[in-house]
Amino acid sequence: MRILTIAALLLVPAASASAASISGEYLEARTCDVYTGPCFANAEMDQSGKEAVMAWKIEKGSWNNVTLNGLTVALVVNAQGTLGDDGVFPMRAGKITSVILVDEKANTAQQQALLAFVKDSAKKLTKNVVKVRRVPMLLKNNHLDGKGVFTAGKIAKIETRKLQKGDCVCTNEIVYYQPLTKVQNFSPAYSQTLSFQGKGLNNRWTTRNIRSAFLATFRK
């Protein structure tokens, strides 16, 4: 695994007018419930949900005129406060730092395009990128079963299953938090595992068995 320099990262524009049509699968998990009752969410606010892993698998398309078919990229986020908003109140996460994980199969041009794509897709979350790493990556979603799997070497991992009747605690559950980026066809899921064991954020975590994930698709 190789580390890309921050100097190279700074050369990547946050957005691109030459971006082309691009689509694929998306998987996200946070360290708080996103599908929950308001009382539970209020109890967790500013106490948890400060970390997230977001992953995109490009099934077809290009960015900055670079074809990215079959490649995966992920963003790992650490904030001072709870990430996300409930659709009414804006996010008040404080200082946010992040790490970008890039598919090791990508060549140099594809690496730069993937970085630009992530910075365009999550502008507020990528203002302070502290590290970029190339790693072997896998992302598979089964929307019917609510099963999502994402791995980035030994650095990051998400495993989900479909929400079940027994996962409702107060019978007043809703999608309290929206996904952290613009996606389509999203549905909440149960995180069996969410883990980040990498460097750069001064924080490592593993959470299990919470209602903290979204399976989705994306198109830009």
Image: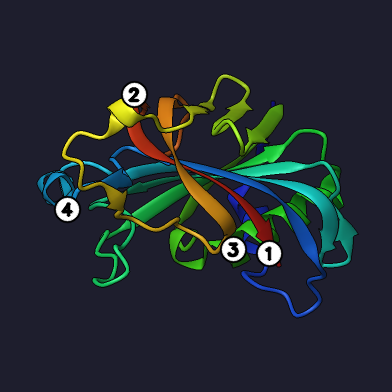
Using the image as rendered, state which of residue 176 and residue 103 is in the foreground: 176
Q: Residues within 10 Å of mark 2 (few under 14, many from 20)?
A: some
Q: Is residue 30 above or below residue 128?
A: above
Task: Report which residue position mark 2 lands on.
Answer: 209
Q: Judge from the rendering whether residue 115 lies leftward or rightward of residue 97; answer left or right.
A: right
- Give the number of the mark in front: 1 or 2: 2
* 155 over 118 or under it: above or below: above
Query: Tag 1: Cα neighbours inside 10 Å, few (<14), some, or many (≥20)?
Result: few
Residue of label 1: 11
Estimate the spatial distance between the alpha carbons at disc 2 and disc 3, rounded to whole Å.
28 Å
Q: Which quadrant does the N terminus fall into? A: top right
Instruction: Name the residue type under label 3.
Output: Ser
Q: Quadrant of the C terminus?
A: bottom right
Earlier-in-chain disc, 3 versus 4 = 4
Residue name at image x 61 percent, y 67 percent: 120
Q: How far is mark 4 from mark 1, CA to CA? A: 42 Å
Residue type beneath disc 1: Leu
Q: Which residue is mark 4?
A: 38
- Above or below, 126 against 21 in this view is above
Residue 4 visible, this angle = no
Res. 40 image quadrant: top left
First of labels 4, 1 by sequence position = 1
* Dot 4 or dot 2, earlier in sequence: 4
Residues under numbered marks 2 and 3 in contact, where contact means CB atoms less than 8 Å apart: no
Disc 3: which residue: 121
Task: Name the amino acid type tagged 2.
Answer: Asn
Q: Quadrant of residue 152?
A: top right
